[in-house]
């Protein structure tokens, strides 16, 4: 067997593993977020608690999705290097563009959720110091 064909098969297996890992990360994020959501709903807290916790769960899920998408983009890039036809490059560019847009907006949402969480901690600290004095 020719070394180029063996290398092609190995890289194809690597690409499949990278994509499966990315899918696994997204799926695991779904499991983590779903269990957090179910646990939150079972405790039956008030609306403010629900909104705060839901925001945190969205941030966690968004982070997992972003991380998984990065792996899938890496797999697509490697796949295109293996077999660089014009059609593959167009497909790769389209996939990367779509995933980049998704990643951008998910990243903004995660940052906003984390910023809200940080603002809540600062607000609680300010309330605690004001009540002491």
Image (cartoon, rainbow, N blue to C red):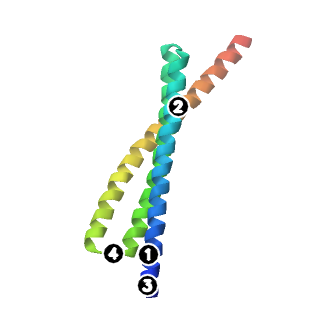
> Mark 2 highlights which residue?
35
Q: Of marks 2 and 1, which one's residue comes earlier in the chain?
A: 1
Instruction: Determine which quarter of the picture holds residue 120.
Output: top right
Residue 80 position in % (x across, y down): 37, 70
Relative to 45, is 56 above or below? below
Q: Nearer the viewer, mark 4 or mark 1?
A: 1
Instruction: Decide if residue 65 is on the left or right side of residue 84.
Output: right
Spatial CA distance of label 3 from label 1 is: 9 Å
Q: Is residue 85 visible?
A: yes
Q: Considering depth in this image, is 29 or 90 the residue closer to the camera?
A: 29
Q: Of marks 4 and 1, which one's residue comes earlier in the chain?
A: 1
Residue that extends furthest to the left in the rendered view of this protein? 87
Q: Nearer the viewer, mark 4 or mark 2?
A: 2
Spatial CA distance of label 3 from label 2 is: 46 Å
> Mark 4 highlights which residue?
84
Residue 85 position in % (x across, y down): 29, 75
> Mark 3 highlights which residue?
4
Q: Residues within 10 Å of mark 2 (few under 14, many from 20)?
A: few
Which numbered dot is residue 105?
none
Q: Of marks 4 and 2, which one's residue comes earlier in the chain?
A: 2
Which numbered dot is residue 9?
1
Which residue is depicted at the point 52% across and 31% down? 35
Q: Secondary structure at mark 3?
A: helix
Q: Of marks 3 and 1, which one's residue comes earlier in the chain?
A: 3
Q: Secondary structure at mark 1?
A: helix
Q: Residues within 10 Å of mark 3 (few under 14, many from 20)?
A: few
Spatial CA distance of label 4 from label 2 is: 42 Å
């Amino acid at each position: 067997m020719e070394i180029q064909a063996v290398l092609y098969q190995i890289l194809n297996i690597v690409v499949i593993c990278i994509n499966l890992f990315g899918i696994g990360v997204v799926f695991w994020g779904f499991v983590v977020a779903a269990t957090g959501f179910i646990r939150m709903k079972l405790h039956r807290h008030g609306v403010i608690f629900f909104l705060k916790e839901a925001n945190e769960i969205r941030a966690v899920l968004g982070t997992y999705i972003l991380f998984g998408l990065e792996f899938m983009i890496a797999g697509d890039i490697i796949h295109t290097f293996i077999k660089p036809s014009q059609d593959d490059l167009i497909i790769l560019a389209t996939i990367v563009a779509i995933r980049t847009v998704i990643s951008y907006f998910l990243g903004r949402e995660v940052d906003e959720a984390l910023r809200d969480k940080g603002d809540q901690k600062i607000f609680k600290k300010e309330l605690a110091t004001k009540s002491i004095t």
